[in-house]
Image: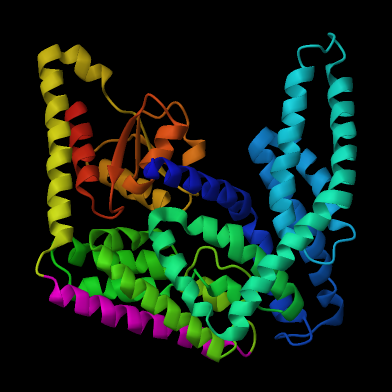
Amino acid sequence: MKSNFRAKVQAFGGFLTAMVIPNMGAFIAWGFITALFIPTGWMPNEKFATLVGPMVTMLLPLLLAYAGGKLIYDVRGGIAGTIGTIGLIVGAEIPMFLGAMIMGPLSAWVVKRVDGVLEKHIPTGFEMLINNFSLGILGFVLCLLSNTIIGPAVQEANALISAAIQALVSTGILPLLSLVNEPAKVLFLNNVIDQGVYYPLGMQHAAESGKSIYFMLASNPGAGLGLLLAYAVFGKGASKSTAPGAIIIHFLGGIHEMYFPYVLMKPITILAMIGGAACGIMTFQFFDAGLVAGPSPGSIFAYLALTPKGNFIGVIAGVTVATLVSFLITSVILKLSNKEDEDVLSTSAAQSAQMKAEGLDFLQKTMGSATAKDTRYSFIAFACDAGMGSSAMGASTMRRALSKAGLDLHVEHFAIEKIPPEADVIVVHEKLADRVGMAVQGKRIITIQNYLDDPAIRALQEEIAKQYGKA
């Protein structure tokens, strides 16, 4: 029951991610314009600064609404979401990011339901006429409702959330959010936190002050860097050997999922993540630091690129402090540990994967060559939350390994909700396996713990090599 609930929350986070991530380029473009051209920017320019307001109040919410609507009902849903959201925007006193993320999918859902009822009763030859007018009429109604009812309700809800966060900021206890942020992140709920809460609030705050600390509450790469550095120095076995590669991908590439398995191997290290993140936030507060847009991916390069004038010392200090604190706490934990949990875990996973491979090999030998041919894999799908970070890295690693073995298979990465039915086998982190089971049925799912060097991936490679006679 708990895993099913977590899978549903992860799916919600995945939906938010699919709505936000495709538009991050537009958010970053707005961040650059803000950082450069507002009166306190690097190159103040009165003409270019006039772009800031229309982009944050009109363009960005409408892009979110279109993306959310399209996820529900393709292009028709995207158009419906945009029409419904413009009603929120007009007359609103704040940028309607939260409203767009609600109204976009909701409008598309309404149009999809109505279309499902109408399509059985449309006379032949009148499809285009009725489809266009039904969308127009529903859009008209949704626009008015959002302007008069939904818009004010969203503003009130936004005001309550903003007031609560501002209260934390003013009292100085904002670092306590790390108690929630860090455990949620390693359970792959990071997108629910960032895309669902902090980034929308950060955009609103940045529109008023030119920067926001909200963008850094859960995205600071420092704590994860400290944890991985400690594993690289004091770890044992696979954890020690894979940590350096994970550092590059996490800190420079911005794929924070890389450090999640290291916390899950030794859960007590979550204390290091909480401590590092909290100290990082305290440092950001001390220097009154902020970013102009959400750093996605959470790379140090993205952090520095989105740092406004006069904030570099505070941003760098916050990342550095988080790194040092996390490193020290993790180092103590690893040094005091008498049992190498990560090696026991790796050994167990390797044995399980080997048993699966042996079972398939036995089946092929028993059933004959025809069965072996039928069980060949030609399309391997790597899946993750957004389909752009850890899954892309895993697919690339698998592709190179198969190529070295003389095999040219179709290996591609996807968001979980976008896994194609043609995939023969799906590789995903074990914490996301329940979501894959909900999204895809009748497919073999291989769960892993480490995208860089996982026994289950190595076993799959060996299995494929045997299938194609390359072993």
Residue 339 shown left or right of residue 83 in the figure:
left
- From the viewer's side, name the closer residue of 173 and 317: 173
Answer with the quarter of the image where residue 327 lies: bottom left
Q: Residue 350, percent across and down?
A: 15, 45
Look at the image and tell me whether residue 86 can be seen.
no
Q: Is residue 213 left or right of residue 11?
A: right
User: Residue 440 is drawn in which quadrant?
Assistant: top left
Looking at the image, residue 134 sits to the left or right of residue 227; the answer is: right
Residue 109 against residue 87 in the figure, above or below: above
Q: Residue at x 37, y 64 (%)?
A: 249
What main secondary structure does the magenta stretch of the protein show? helix
Q: Residue at x 40, y 33 (%)?
A: 437
Q: How is the image coloured?
A: rainbow
Q: Position of residue 94 (x, y in %)?
A: 80, 66
Up/down of 56 relative to 115, above or below: below
**Residue 285: percent from the left, percent from the top?**
55, 86
Q: Quadrant of the N terminus?
A: top left
Residue at image point 41% right, 84% down: 320
Residue 182: x and y in percent read: 41, 66
Residue 397 visible? The answer is: yes
Per the rendered image, the range of residues in magenta is 310-337
- Toward the viewer: 43 or 96? 96
Asked if residue 171 is among those painted magenta in the image, a careful observer would answer no
- Which quadrant of the view contains residue 370? top left
